[in-house]
Structures are given as C-alpha cells and as structure tokens.
Image (cartoon, helix red, strand yellow):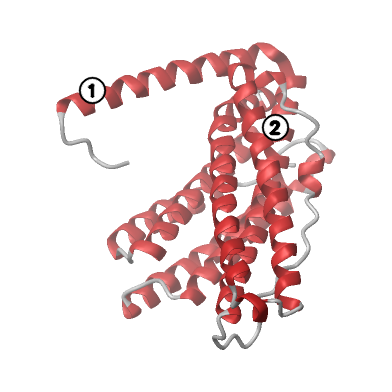
C-alpha cells in the first residue's frame, strides 16, 4: 500500500481499516456459530476455488502468450514455434455447487464474483479457440493480421477481468476460511503442527508476493533477504518440532509433516540461489523465477497432503 501523504487521507485509511476489522469480526462470529458442517463447507469451497484459480491462471497466462505470438506471426515476424496451450479440465471448479451460507454477508458478493470468474474463463477459452483456428488456417494472410490483433485485445481485457474476479474472491473468502479452520482445529490432535505449518505457508506467500513484484519492478536485495530471514526462522521452528500425536490413524502424518519441512528447506535453497544470481544480474532471471515457482508448488502440494 502506498504511503498516504496527507492527514485527511491517513484518517480515511484508518477508518476503512476499523470498518474492515468490524466486518471481519462479524464474519468470524457468524462462522463460529454456524458449527463444524458449515465450517467444513467453507474450507472445501476455499480449497476447490484456490486449486481452480491456480490451474486456470496458468492456462490463461499460456493463452496470453499464445495471443502475443499469434499477432507477431500474423504480421510476418519470425515465430519459431507457437507457445503450447494444453487443454485444461477444471475439476476443482466443477466441485463447487454453490457458495456456502457460512460466508454470511459476503455470500452474495462472492456469488457475483464467481459468476464473472466462470464467464470470463469460458470467454477466454472460446476466443483462444477462434484465434488458434485463424492461425492454423493462415487466414491472417487475407487481412494482414487484423483479426489476430483484435482477438489479442479481447483476450487481454477478459483476462484482466478474470484475474480481478479471482483476486476479489480470494480476498473475500480468506477471513471466513481462517475462522472455519479455527472451528475445525479447535480440538484437533494435530492443531499445533497444522498452525505452525500454516505459519510457514503464510511467510512463503509473502515471499512470493515480494518476488513477483521485484520480477517486474526491479530486484531489491535488502527486501528479498529480509523475507528470506523471516521464512528461514519459521521453517527452522517447524522443522524442530517432534511429531508426537497419539492415535494410529495419525501415524502416517509424521512422514507427511517431515516431507513438508524438507520441501520448505529446498525452497530456501532455491531462494538463496535466486538472491545470489539476481545480485549478479541486477534483476531476477527468468530461470530463477521458474525454479522458485516450481519449488513453491512442491511446498504447497506437500502442505495440502499433510493437512488434508
């Protein structure tokens, strides 16, 4: 958030923050009263949506890259190979049958954003298929690439709306999901390990936010190192925990907990390499951002396996 330079603006931000906190408290209280069934429904919605958003975002990004190459190709520029766009079957989204009532006052807003999310996703897919047909049949030779440019603009606009809706949903579901987790974890034997591992994931997400910003806006070694130190501390604390949960049904979780910590440690390895390479290049190299993204996915997958 940019610093506010006037007292009036600073006050308006403070008021907004208080208003949001009151709203969050209301949602948390509503979730707490709704019981375990609604809490589980909220968590299921959260998990399914985040998985959908993650996979579809990659698919949309690939389509954007394809559209950019299509415009170049249609203009006669050299394109050695068109970016690959693999068909995407969004099974996670198909599991979402509705927005749980446990989201309380946010339910209607989430429903509206979800409709936009689905419509934009479908629209982008249709425009991609149209563009692919246009390129494959070399119809650009008839109009000098005019249709490719028009479709690229449409895809970019729809993608922007898609990502906006997705981010809005993520923001809206977070408070209720965290409250629901508290309800589910209240008497859970693994509560300490899950909460501690979630803390690692929160620090990991903060790292990815910083690296995402620095990848486009410029590398800042001090900021990157600060986030590294924070994450390293959280990973170290979690890794030192001795998994000791009674009950045979939880025995297999010990290996999953250790695997999560191992993947988090490997992420730190990639992160140190990224910082070193970025200092030398004075920017974050593409290869490093790809490595760190892959490492993040490995940590996230191991975390999901552990907490499920």
* Residue 74 on image: x %, y %: 60, 79
Q: Is 8 positioned to the left or the right of 40 in the image?
A: left
Residue shown at the point (69%, 13%) measured from the top left: 34
> In terms of secondary structure, where does tag 1 sit?
helix
* Residue 295 on image: x %, y %: 58, 64
- Gap between marks 2 and 1 measured at Cα: 35 Å
In the picture of the structure, the residue carrying the numbered disc 2 is 43
Residue shown at the point (70%, 47%) measured from the top left: 52
Q: Residues within 10 Å of mark 2 (few under 14, many from 20)?
A: many
Q: In the rendered image of this protein, does residue 194 appear above or below residue 226? A: above
How many numbered markers are drawn? 2
Q: Is 61 positioned to the left or the right of 216 in the image?
A: right
In the picture of the structure, the residue carrying the numbered disc 1 is 11
* Residue 68 on image: x %, y %: 56, 71
User: Which numbered circle lies on residue 206?
Assistant: none
For the N terminus, the quadrant is: top left
Looking at the image, which residue sits at the far right?
248
Residue 260 in view = yes
Residue 82 in view = no
Judging depth in this view, the residue of 234 and 301 nearest the camera is 301
Earlier residue among tags 2 and 1? 1
Q: Quadrant of residue 285?
A: bottom left
Judging depth in this view, the residue of 99 and 137 nearest the camera is 137
Residue shown at the point (59%, 85%) measured from the top left: 79
Judging depth in this view, the residue of 183 and 128 nearest the camera is 128
* Residue 84 on image: x %, y %: 70, 74
For the C terminus, the quadrant is: top right
Looking at the image, which residue sits at the far front?
142
């Amino acid at each position: 958030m940019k610093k506010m330079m006037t007292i009036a603006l600073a006050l308006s931000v403070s008021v907004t923050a208080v208003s949001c906190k009151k709203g969050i408290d209301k949602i948390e209280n509503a979730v707490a009263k709704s019981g375990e069934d609604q809490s589980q429904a909220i968590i299921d919605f959260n998990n399914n949506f985040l998985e959908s958003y993650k996979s579809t975002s990659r698919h949309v990004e690939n389509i954007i890259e394809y559209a950019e190459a299509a415009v170049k190709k249609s203009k006669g520029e050299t394109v050695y190979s068109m970016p690959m766009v693999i068909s995407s079957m969004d099974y996670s989204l198909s599991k979402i049958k509705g927005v749980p009532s446990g989201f309380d006052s946010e339910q209607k807003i989430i429903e509206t954003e979800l409709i936009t999310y689905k419509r934009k996703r479908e629209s982008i897919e249709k425009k991609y298929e149209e563009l692919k047909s246009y390129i494959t049949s070399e119809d650009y030779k008839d109009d000098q690439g005019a249709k490719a440019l028009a479709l690229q603009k449409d895809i970019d606009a729809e993608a922007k709306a898609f990502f906006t809706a997705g981010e809005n949903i993520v923001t809206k579901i977070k408070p209720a999901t965290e409250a629901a987790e508290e309800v589910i974890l209240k008497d859970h034997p693994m509560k300490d390990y899950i909460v501690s591992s979630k803390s690692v994931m929160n620090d990991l997400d903060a790292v990815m936010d910083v690296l995402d910003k620095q990848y486009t806006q410029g590398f800042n070694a001090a900021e990157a190192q600060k986030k590294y130190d924070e994450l390293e501390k959280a990973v170290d604390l979690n890794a030192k925990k001795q998994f000791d949960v009674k009950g045979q049904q939880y025995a297999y979780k010990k290996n999953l907990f250790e695997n999560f910590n191992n993947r988090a440690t490997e992420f730190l390895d990639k992160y140190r390499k990224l910082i070193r390479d970025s200092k030398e290049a004075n920017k974050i190299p593409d290869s490093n951002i790809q490595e760190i993204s892959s490492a993040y996915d490995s940590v996230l997958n191991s975390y999901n396996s552990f907490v499920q």
